[in-house]
Image (cartoon, rainbow, N blue to C red):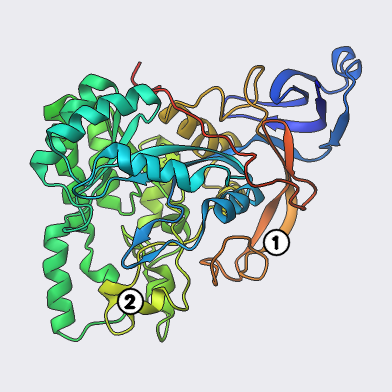
């Protein structure tokens, strides 16, 4: 059965332009756009008409950095693929790229298959995977080639977390050399984990156990140093580099300097670095534990460099690094020892709204909002133009967004499976009203009408900024 849906009367915003247009959807894809009120648009008929008058019609968000069900610090991220993708849909995100994990002593294939199994039949929206490399050797290097052919075209390495995910410079160089020949993209958690572990040990020995010390030991200089080192290793390997969750001004400067040399170096930041700060880590009692993530929150003055980086395109993407742990029973594992607090924040539901607020606050333009949240992540990770835009042939991942609706972010109204909001009480303007995933309405006027299993696994091409 062919189905046609018409989204009528809205302002269509993509990374490229803004047009008052009607959008015709047929069999899960965008069939056509035509100027609202034109003879062409007026002649269209559909099984369902969605009125978008006075609303924005935008592409579904692409969140290229999430961790559903991630094992970490003796526990698991509290969102499953089912709860996490449902929350993403509520927030106007229609595609996530999550991270499959290789365990030390095991192959990439084994880790990937475990993540396929976790997500299969559970997701409310479409999904894809990156691969975390925890054990780089000749066998895993060969597996990288096979994964690229399979549509897993990006690989994350960690300069942090010795004994868990950490890779040394030699392992990093080998993986980068492999990616330079197979077309893969290396994603880097850039913090000097060896040095940080020394500072953690020293802080705890001094009795500095509160959550705020998590930020103090993970120093800006050690993020900047690791970012610099990662860039130089990528230069040696002749490989592109994508630095995840950039949080500090000096790290932005390292990426900007590399890009000024014409190097294929890219940077991502996250809403928590743009809207939260060390003030949150220092909240009284143990409340600061809610905000423990790595890279850590920074003093407020770093926000200016991050916004500037987004405007100048030295940072290209805003993802969430969504990795929620409940305050009760999970974050509390670190009472009396900040190093045992599971690292991660909830955010997959809040990203599109927070970035719309940034438009209203004058940090970015409307089209840049769509660029950093939809189009660029889709291009960066080989999903464009299937995802990330509204154009004929694209998947009908479409959000009707009310730019005037006012809301207060709160644990009481969110849909993420976690017992607090990182943005509790924050008042923002703009709210998702209706969401279509491949033409199927999954949020209908602020009601969830989707289902687990609607979301499809989506193999990816290679990074489209390297052609």
Task: Tell me if mark 2 has few (under 14), some (14-19) or many (20+) residues whose alpha carbon lies within 10 angstroms of its own.
Answer: many
Count of numbered badges drawn on the protein? 2
Instruction: Tell whether 151 sits left or right of 256.
Output: right
Quadrant the N terminus occupies: top right
Q: Residue 69: where, in percent of width, then height?
A: 44, 56
Instruction: Tell whether 411 sits left or right of 100.
Output: right
Choose between 2 and 411: the one closer to the eye. 2
Q: Residue 83: where, in percent of width, then height?
A: 58, 56
Instruction: Tell whether 110 sits left or right of 41.
Output: left
Provide the secondary structure element on which disc 1 rests: strand
Q: Residue 394: where, in percent of width, then height?
A: 62, 22
Residue named by callout 2: 211
State whether residue 373 is above or below residue 421.
Answer: above
Residue named by callout 1: 407
- Does any portion of residue 22 appear in the rendered image? yes
Q: Which mark is residue 15?
A: none
State whether residue 208 is above or below residue 117.
Answer: below
Toward the top, the furthest residue is 40
Residue 50 is drawn in which quadrant?
top right
Provide the secondary structure element on which disc 2 rests: loop
Choose between 167 and 115: the one closer to the eye. 115
Task: Tell me if mark 1 has few (under 14), some (14-19) or many (20+) residues whose alpha carbon lies within 10 angstroms of its own.
Answer: some
Q: Residue 115: where, in percent of width, then height?
A: 42, 45
Toward the left, the furthest residue is 170
Choose between 32 and 284: the one closer to the eye. 32
């Amino acid at each position: 059965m062919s189905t046609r849906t018409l989204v009528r009367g809205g302002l269509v915003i993509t990374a490229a332009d803004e047009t008052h247009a009607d959008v015709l959807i047929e069999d899960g894809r965008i069939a056509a756009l035509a100027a609202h009120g034109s003879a062409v648009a007026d002649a269209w008929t559909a099984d369902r008409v969605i009125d978008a008058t006075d609303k924005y019609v935008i592409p579904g968000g692409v969140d290229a950095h999430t961790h559903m069900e991630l094992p970490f610090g003796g526990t698991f991220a509290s969102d499953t693929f089912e709860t996490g993708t449902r929350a993403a849909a509520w927030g106007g995100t229609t595609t996530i790229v999550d991270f499959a994990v290789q365990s030390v002593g095991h192959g990439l294939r084994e880790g990937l298959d475990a993540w396929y199994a976790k997500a299969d039949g559970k997701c409310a929206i479409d999904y894809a995977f990156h691969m975390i490399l925890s054990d780089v050797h000749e066998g895993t290097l060969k597996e990288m080639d096979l994964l690229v052919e399979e549509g897993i075209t990006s690989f994350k390495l960690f300069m942090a977390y010795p004994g868990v995910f950490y890779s040394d410079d030699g392992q990093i160089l080998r993986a980068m050399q492999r990616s330079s020949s197979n077309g893969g993209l290396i994603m880097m958690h850039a913090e000097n984990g060896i040095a940080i572990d020394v500072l953690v040990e020293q802080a705890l020995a001094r009795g500095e156990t509160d959550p705020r010390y998590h930020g103090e030991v993970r120093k800006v200089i050690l993020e900047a140093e690791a970012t610099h080192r990662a860039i130089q290793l990528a230069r040696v390997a002749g490989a592109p580099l994508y630095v995840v969750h950039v949080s500090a001004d000096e790290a932005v400067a390292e990426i900007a300097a590399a890009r000024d040399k014409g190097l294929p170096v890219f940077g991502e930041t996250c809403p928590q670095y743009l809207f939260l700060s060390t003030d949150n880590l220092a909240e009284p009692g143990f409340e600061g534990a809610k905000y423990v993530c790595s890279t850590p929150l920074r003093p407020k003055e770093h926000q200016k460099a991050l916004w500037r980086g987004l405007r100048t395109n030295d940072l290209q993407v805003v993802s969430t690094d969504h990795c929620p742990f409940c305050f009760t029973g999970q974050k509390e594992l670190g009472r009396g020892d900040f190093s045992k607090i599971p690292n991660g924040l909830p955010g997959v539901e809040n990203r599109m709204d927070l970035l719309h607020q940034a438009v209203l606050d004058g940090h970015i333009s409307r089209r840049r909002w769509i660029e950093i949240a939809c189009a660029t992540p889709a291009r960066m990770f080989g999903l464009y133009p299937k995802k990330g835009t509204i154009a004929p042939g694209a998947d009908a991942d479409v959000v009707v967004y009310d730019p005037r609706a006012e809301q207060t972010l709160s644990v009481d109204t969110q849909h993420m499976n976690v017992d607090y909001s990182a943005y509790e009480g924050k008042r923002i303007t703009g709210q998702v009203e209706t969401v279509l995933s491949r033409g199927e309405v999954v949020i209908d006027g602020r009601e969830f009408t989707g289902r687990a299993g609607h979301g499809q696994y989506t193999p990816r091409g290679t990074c489209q900024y390297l052609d």
